[in-house]
Image (cartoon, helix red, strand yellow):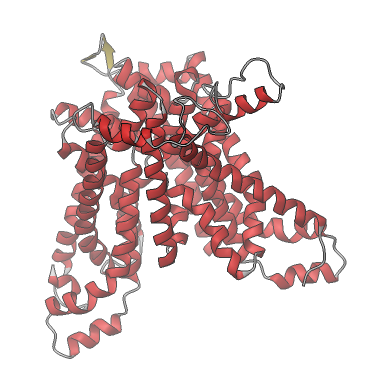
Amino acid sequence: MQTRNPYRTLSNAFAALVYLFLILPLLVVVLFSFSERSYFSFPPAGFSLRWYQAAWESGQFLVPALRSLWLALAATAVAAVLSIPAALAFRKIAPGKLRSALEFFLLTPLIVPALIIGIALLYSFNRLQMLDTFGALLAAHAVIVFPFMFRAVLTSVLGLRQSLIDASEILGASPAYTLRKVILPALIPGIASGAIFSFIISLDQFTVSLFVTQSEQIVLPVAIYKYLFDVNDPVAAAVSTVLVVFGLLIAFVIDRLGWLRHLSGASA
Amino acid sequence: MSALAATPGTPGRGMRWLALLPALLLVTLLVALPLVDMGLISFKSESFGQIQPGFTLANYIGLLTGAGNLTLFVNTFLTAAAVTLLSALLGFPVAAAIARAPEKWRGILYFLVAAPLLVNTVVRSYGWLLILGRKGLVNEALGALGLIDAPLALTGNYLGVIIGGTQVFLPFMILSLTTSLMAIDRRLLDAADILGAGPVRAFLTVTLPLAVPGLIAGSVLVFSLMLGAFVTPLILGGTAIKYISVAVYTDALVLFNLPRATAMSLLLMVVVLAIYFVQKRLTRQQEA
């Protein structure tokens, strides 16, 4: 099919090494979590599940983990409830300076680095005496994930076919009925894709969570970070392995749904 | 809310703004106003953790003229530039492999690039700590081979941050390059081949120029993400390095020098926003 090309072989071999580079840190964490020793050794010594047991029994991770999950769900829901009407309103604003400015404004939580939002919120929540409360955490996460949800829903909204809406109206449907039976069903894929990305962005969010919490309301990534610098035994690796598996599972689901390509604009 | 769905002509102007209001409020209350507030603090002075009345430019003057602070900005930019360059060099062969892979392999190759993005950044940086630490994988391996006597310092410095940062942001570069490379018309490469261009010449005159848009988009994205990155510099560099994000964190939460931290944040934000607008303009030109 193709002529033998030594450069191509070389390039492919190099690409294989880059794949190893991408996967290696995840692999090392997983291997370390099953280690029998409390320090790192290679090749891994023995096989043990005691770090998983220790992580479970320590009680330092379970509550933050549940809080992280609940927080991600709640922030995603808030973002969805705000995004849907906003995106529908965008349909009625002609493309131009105003729409670009509005879009830029609504996407600022994505454009401004999380660190800067974190420090701004630290100062504001501190003055409102809201630091280290779940309310502050939820507000912060809702605004961080909002752009991801909004962008996904907006793409669906702008792809809506006017002819369907016209048909519904001509056939005598009320605007409310059209919204419920024609418009919202057409937005489901956008909302679902926005939700899954919002959820994962919230779970990954470390920086803003670190700034707006102290000890009462810490989330899972912050708990792992604190543990790393206090103890640093494979318990951190055991908890991290759970997150690796969880992340890969979500990646698998997103891949099946054909949404992996949407990742290219996500923020880390 | 239902009037949103109304056909053009029905009164919807007021409803339109009503529908936008909650979202606008969210961003105003939680991003815009806190940023303005933060901007005001950056013009104040502090003493023993207390904000003093009156306005001053001292924080900015100090940041922009102090020799130590200049290194802070220069080192941050150089680190981000190094991560961007490494991402381009490592990313190109991977993107090329994905672009020319047979259909059935392309999916899995793409998946393996994108999947690490969905694993928590703290966890990925921790993995690098295990690889690069004093008793980490690399030092153990080199020690066992008798190549080194004392462990190499691979974390707590810029090297660790650059390695970790590259792994964290490389997928964005690869995804961006892949998009460009997949769009290349294969007939151009065939034509180059028929006209007698060798693989190197074909790469330099066909593939590379056509990959430039993806390369630029990926570089801008990786560079600005790395400039604002906090997790990887904190875990793999720590306070031993001069990095804007880590310095902001130290100033705000350890030294309680909020005016300096906010001034530094705003300078960083101006740079990131400038990059964003330049990139917007570039993509618009490409589309036009």
List the single residue furthest toward the right. Answer: B196
List the single residue furthest toward the bottom. Answer: A171
Image height of A219 relative to A100, above or below? above
B247 left or right, relative to A127: right
Answer with the quarter of the image where residue A95 lies: bottom left
Q: Nearer the viewer, residue B235 or B177?
A: B235
B227 left or right, relative to A150: right
The answer to whether residue A169 of the structure is visible from this angle is yes
Q: Nearer the viewer, residue B166 or B16?
A: B166
Q: Nearer the viewer, residue A43 or B215?
A: A43
Q: Residue at x 22, y 41 (%)?
A: A67
A131 left or right, relative to A21: left
List the single residue furthest toward the top. Answer: B48
Answer with the quarter of the image where residue B20 lies: bottom left
Q: Residue at x 24, y 74 (%)?
A: A185
Residue B154 at x, y percent in the picture: 58, 24
Q: Residue at x 55, y 44 (%)?
A: A22
Residue B177 at x, y percent in the picture: 59, 55
Q: Nearer the viewer, residue B286 or A119?
A: A119
Q: Residue at x 48, y 43 (%)?
A: B275
A81 left or right, relative to B186: left
Answer with the quarter of the image where residue B98 lies: bottom right
Residue A128 at x, y percent in the picture: 13, 30
Image height of B16 relative to B231, above or below? below
Residue A16 at x, y percent in the picture: 65, 50
Assign the N terminus of chain B to one quadrant of the image. bottom left
Q: How many marks?
A: 0
The answer to whether residue B6 of the structure is visible from this angle is no
